[in-house]
Amino acid sequence: MKKILMAGLIVALGICFFPQHCLALSFGYLLPNVNDAYGNMIDHMYSVIFWIVTIVFLITEGFLVFCVIRYRSKEGRQATYTHGNKYAEIIWTVIPAIILIWLAIYQKQTWDFIREDFPPPNKSLTVQVFAQQFAWNFRYADPKGSFGAPDDITTIDQMHVPVGKKVVIHMTSDDVIHDFFVPYARLKQDAVPGMLSESWFEMDKLGCWNLKSQTPMILTRKQFENLKVALDGFLLMYKVLGVTGARKYYYEPMPGKKFADVIYHGKVSREPIAQVQYVQHPFEIACSQLCGIGHYRMVGYLTVDTPASYRWWMKKMIKEKYQTNMRLWRVWDKYYPQYNN
Amino acid sequence: MNVESHEEIIHPEPTGFFRKYVWSYDHKVIAKQYFFTTMCFLLLGGFLAMLIRWQLAYPFQPVPILGKLLASRFFFDSTGAITPSGYLQIVTLHGTIMVFFVMIPLLVGAFGNFLIPLQIGARDVAFPLLNALSYWLYVLGGIVILSSLFLRQGAAESGWTAYPPLSDVSTATPGSGMGQIFWLIAIFIVGFSSIVGGINFLTTIVKMRAPGMTWGRLPLVTWAQLITAVFQTLATPVLGAAATLMLCDKLLKTAYFIPTGLQSADQLIGGAGGGHPLLWQHLFWFYSHPAVYILVLPAMGIASELIATFSRKPIFGYKPMVVSLAVIMGLGFVVWGHHMFVSGMSPAMATGFMMTTMLIALPSSVKVFNWLGTLWKGSIQLTSAGLCGISFVAMFIIGGLSGIFLAATPVDIYLHDSYYVIAHFHYIVFGASLFAIFGGIYYWFPKMFGRMMNERLGKLHWLLTFITFNLTFFPMHFLGEGGQMRRLATITNYEFLQPLQNLNVFISIAAFLLGISQLIFIFNFFYSMLYGKKAPANPWNATGLEWTLPSPVPYYNFEKIPMVYRGPYEYSSPEALKQGKDWIAQSDPLGFEKS
């Protein structure tokens, strides 16, 4: 019985921790990050902690398994009578204390940079975000740069930002607390009603979709400009694969459309839809704070543009006088006019 | 302390059924009442977890058997699938039940009640009437929360954290009408029960220790209960206040948590407005972070006891163990803000909370090293109780280490409210605390029911639980790292989460196996209670005062209040070895007194 049990213990420990932990190492698990300003700092902090924790994990769990095997009760074994050891206590208090305090100080710089070093208004683009059940509303300032003017651009669930430009988000919520989460950008900030939340980011990569393989790609600005990428004319579709609800996503030309606006080396031209190989693809904005029964489907889309495609999009928006959900924005202007300055 | 005054039995043992089993003042009966009630809630909460896992693996698919039976009732639609609103009710009830109706009453109400008087050498707790009141208040709270299931719009839906305005504004979500009011009343009642229990245990431990039971000789189980009682007494009133404020918002149309200009369903809400949603978060976490320690400190005590007994060694570093408990208590009150790093709270305050959170990792790590030190050079008996005690440490290490990622403010930006958090606290509350509870049950079962639990079944249960637990919760770290958020009825609406769906199915299957493995424990428990081997007074050769009593413990515990001569874990001491055994009870007279 004892032997079976010992074997069971070792196998259990073996199965449960080590391969899984090794798996985590080899996967490098976090999503790719596309936020140039501080995404790498967060990922760096993550891996610093990961290595410290892994070493502590291996030492402590290893010692535990060693003790259980080496000192298991058997005929003639006598436990050593001791109440502890002053020096051991000092060592294992002081060393973790040093590591923890160092970690606290080390990460503070990153945190201060992310949350306190906001880019100045003349070097950044400000976008207002108004969350509601269950949609993201975005407002871009009019050409003179003021919010709350009659010719602002407002969109729903669609956000566009230029690559390599610092973007500041001014955000609040209309009804309940939501959370603006862009996983690829390492950005997460609650939208709390009655309160202005500010955060910022800077995207350095662009999303794109390969129509031939029907897979998403993440490209640098240079790679993106070397491809002919369609800016419109396509719809993102999916089919459900089975009872697990997993989906296969694909792009399809809009019904009846023959031509699409395609960007290549910063120039937009119209091309036949049949010849298009790549489509611009947004990153997703998720809601990360429970906000009601539609919480699981509160998806927004963040498109990263090159400066040229951003101009193309802005021009189109201004030309169409694109505005949605103005009732909601009137709430913002009535109750939170101070957020427009 | 005056020994004589305890000597005669003031209250004779009640004979009527009602006074003996229902409205009993006997701490052992109340402990058993707590025990069976929490076990029922544990089954319910676990069952709700199975529903959560079903929904995440097979979203909006009919639930087998149950869905058919309960179609169009509770959480199910007419096909027997879980609705989005039903899913939020399940999530809310799972969290609420497991925290407020299982772990706290089980660790404090059941284990605390049973063990504190026995371990300090007292005949009962200080206030037996309050003790009974505390239990029945808890039952009342349980009835209120369960009855909310039968409301037309269903139970509360805003998660166990009940963040306003979602919880506060009745039109924000269906469950925020009557369901949330029931939730708040239930929380207020169990909070009250918890405060009453805390005051009772504080008084008992401070005032009723047997002669010779100095602070330095108190078993660590009782030390942990003492610190927990401080948390309960000082932190729970804040939760009660918060619940009262929200009830005022809902019933009296005040606006403590409702800001000016708040809309819901296109209507302006809140009369005067001027409240603030973050106020609730501060009040709630001021209680609920200490509550997290209420969930683990008593388990730490139990694990210390198990590890010392089954290593046949005194606990390594008794004093550092006690000091680290006290430090956890002190720091535990000033770390609540780490739940709010991305809430919009001032970044400077977040830095402060990050510092205190990093510091609170220190006493926990000191405790881990001391447990390892206790195992070192011991003579480790791998009984089912011993295995559970050791598993506590193994799981606590993982849960503690993953906490460091979440304490780091920059990393928390990415991992906050993700499945990483779920993995982290289930490693603490399930992996660590529940293993300690299982161990505690195997260990003290003979004292409670006078019979032994089956060792073979116990070990089988341990092995299956250990494997399936890790297969369930370890991959959740990967889900969090892959960006999966909490409380989503399904992740399939997000393109970037598609690769994780297969892992979700894997986790669900492991969780179902984990659930099924618990049947072994239930069978073992009831079978042993009725037909188990008769237990001797001290089956584990343990040193505490409770083991000097016959099994089961007689009414009024100690015929004569014992005298305590030495520390709690005198295993393998030279004094004992001289007598030809490897343990010596706390109340065994010293050698020179005997002769």
Image (cartoon, coloured by chain):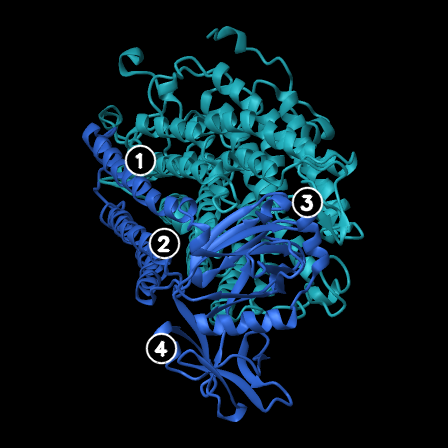
**Residue B505 position in % (x across, y down):** 51, 68
If you read the primary sequence from the N terminus, does the residue marked by circle 2 or circle 4 appear first?
2
Q: CA distance from mark 2 to mark 3?
A: 35 Å
Q: Residues within 10 Å of mark 2 (few under 14, many from 20)?
A: many
If you read the primary sequence from the N terminus, does the residue marked by circle 4 or circle 3 appear first?
4
Q: CA distance from mark 1 to mark 4?
A: 52 Å
Q: CA distance from mark 3 to mark 1?
A: 52 Å
Q: Report the side of A208 relative to B493 (left or right).
A: left
Badge 2 vs badge 1, beta-carbon distance below 8 Å: no
Which residue is tagged 2?
A42
**Residue B106 position in % (x across, y down):** 55, 38
The image shows a total of numbered marks equal to 4
Label 3 marks a residue whose chain is A
Q: Give the secondary structure at mark 2.
A: helix
Q: Give the secondary structure at mark 4.
A: helix
Q: CA distance from mark 4 to mark 3?
A: 44 Å
Q: Report the side of B279 relative to B205 (left or right).
A: right
Which residue is tagged 1?
B366
Which residue is tagged 4?
A223
Closest to the observer: A91 or B553?
A91
Chain shown in cyan: B
